[in-house]
Image (cartoon, rainbow, N blue to C red):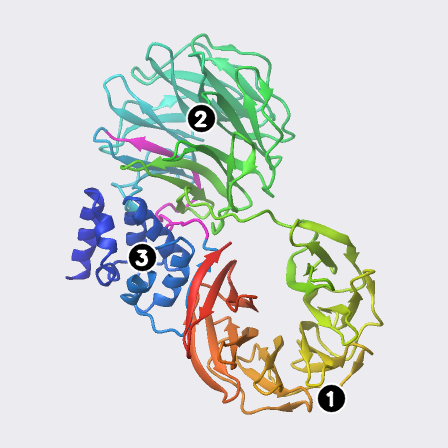
Amino acid sequence: MPADGVRRLVGLAAAVGRLDELVAAPGLLSHVDPPVLLLALHSAGEQGRVWAAVLSAAGLPAAGVSVTGQGDRLRIAMSGFGAVDADAWAAGWGHGSVIDPVWSTAPPAFCAPLRGHTGCVRAMAAVPLPDGSMLLASGSQDRTVRLWDPGTGEPVGAPLTGHHNWVHAVAAVPSPDGRTLLASGSGDGTVGFWDPGTGEPVGAPLHTGPVEAVAAVSLPGGPMLLASGSFDCTVRLWDPGTDEPVGTPLTGHSRGVAAVAAASLADGRTLLASGSWDGTVRLWDPGTGEPVGVPLTGHSGGVRSVVAVSLPDGRTLLASGSQDYTVRLWDPSTGEPAGAPLTGHTDWVAAVAAVPLPDGRTLLASGSGDGTVRLWDPSTGEPIGAPLTGHPGEVVAVAAVPLMGGSMLLAAGSGDGTVWLWDPAIDDQVGLPLTGHAGGVAAVAAVPLPGGSMLLASGSRDHTVRLWDPSTGEPIGAPLTGHPGEVVAVAAVPLADGRTLLASGSGDGTVRFWDLSTGEPAGVPLTGHTGGVTAVAAVPLPGGSMLLASGSRDHTVRLWDPSTGEPIGTPLTGHTGEVVAVAAVPLPGGSMLLASGSRDHTVRLWDPSTGELVGVPLTGHTDGVTAVAAVPLPDGRTLLASGGQDYTVRLWDPATSEQLGHTETPGEVYALSLLPDGHLAVGYGSQVAVMRLSAGRTAHVMACWG
């Protein structure tokens, strides 16, 4: 079937709720552009949404990118979402690797961005249509409003034009005749109404001060009003049926009103909330125009957004996002804060939205100038999962978008003019982060102690090493200080006397040893490299002695005696690029090799006893080799795994220098680690995948987490 025919078939299947059946035909779906398939899958059943998550986690959202031949990436992504029959399904997309996934840390799925606006997307709203379908409306600094089909990601009609300044706000407004209108507020001082079914304006624009916020407000008994918040410090109410103002402007804010929202309370009342650049939230009775209670204070910056959030217990909270980087929750019935501020964003919180899920929960979404969207449990104030990242600009608008069938998407408007769609129901958080470093963490290593216990060591760009109890997440002792440069490599080094030292390599060009029992340096820094030290590894030798290998930006590998701190022999030379990975590779019979990976795209094998190169450089990577690890097999052989910036993991036989095969990953590979059960952990991009080797020369990826 021609590709355009397949595309129409996908759209038809999504429309009638039978897209899940097409998922079983990978050869057919492989002809559909990933963005089209991604968005269509979100309209399918639960299985379809899982496949949408799989496809996006595989890193294949770009239009025109064929998924044929991408089986490796898809298999890794599938393992992160529990997709069944992954082997059979991925086979239709081209798979011939020697490694298969076990599990992965694939993030919540995002769809390809919706493109069309030429300016920052400042507002979004879901707009229901009479037939039960849903549109997504977006307002932009390009002075237009656009309508989108959230099920396909396609624009609906031409842009809605007429505003002469930024469109700051959009809202769906039910009208008395049963239609739903779309209201837009602009910096040109007008509020416009549109028929979303035709894209035509309805009535004349409502003239007021520059408008930054609009919201529909349902009054007891059924009447519907439109509220608008303006830079002139007022809130105005309008009758959308007559286009006439209702009452006088609501005054009290001392600076511009940036946000308005209706809040329906358990006692049947509806309040109107307004958030202002003056840092306060005010509550109003929309029936009388009178203020309710005193202003809600606590934010130390302007309030950019407000939204009502319904809880499962019947209560309604009010959420506000602010320039002070926080989200606050309030009880609108009392005017009191509900818990502590929600922190985590590193820039203004420009948008908040309630996100009802099919399971009955309601999440709170917040979008920020830091380029992320965060999800929160409003009942507890706790974050849900990791931040949703990938937006190329600040996130200044978020909106929940219900789809037919009961599923929900989260739309985020970005500063580059794109709209991103996320599935908020996919949550993959595992545990809580270990916090304490003041800079990025560049290296971690397990450190076994006498008695069988284990510590975790981390090296950071804040120039320190920290020790942690991995069973509790608590820090052990004070940070290990002494490096004047960032610490980018750490490794445990067992000694013949039973002690274990910790080695750290730094951008300052030195290696340091640490006594784990005291946290003090063990000896003086090891000097000799003329560039930063980027990798360290313990290298056991026959007879029980131990060496330490270090790789450097000076293109060399050096060997050291950890018991004396003295260099062993001369530097190992041959690489023509930075050496960023080293690992010991045991061979049958008790001998040992040392592997080094370099940005010159090669892996080299060395005899650590003599410092001589063993065989020829291992070539095949098309970009820098950033990770190496030994992989023992049940039959007694040991393979060598290498990971690179070319998005691959490759397997080698170190005894023959033969490449046994490779597996593609969705991101650059920067870490490889052998797990106690024999599986290989692979760090790619911001995710982790676990892979296993089967009998013979093949391997299988089992699962992923993140």
506 left or right of 423 in image: right
Type of amino acid under label 2: Pro
Q: Residues within 10 Å of mark 2 (few under 14, many from 20)?
A: few
Q: Is residue 39 visible?
A: yes
- Toward the front, the furthest residue is 451
Mark found first going from the N terminus, 2 or 3: 3
| Residue behind mark 1 | 570
- In depth, the one of 239 and 399 nearer the eye is 399
| Residue behind mark 3 | 34
- Secondary structure under the numbered disc 2 in the rendered image: loop
Q: How crowded is mark 3: few (under 14 residues within 10 Å), some or many (20 or more)?
A: many
Residue stretch rendered in magenta on the structure: 107-129
Type of amino acid under label 3: Pro
Q: Where is residue 267 in the image (x, y as percent from the top left)?
A: 45, 11
| Residue behind mark 2 | 312
Mark 2–mark 3 distance (CA, rounded to whole Å): 36 Å
Mark 2–mark 1 distance (CA, rounded to whole Å): 69 Å
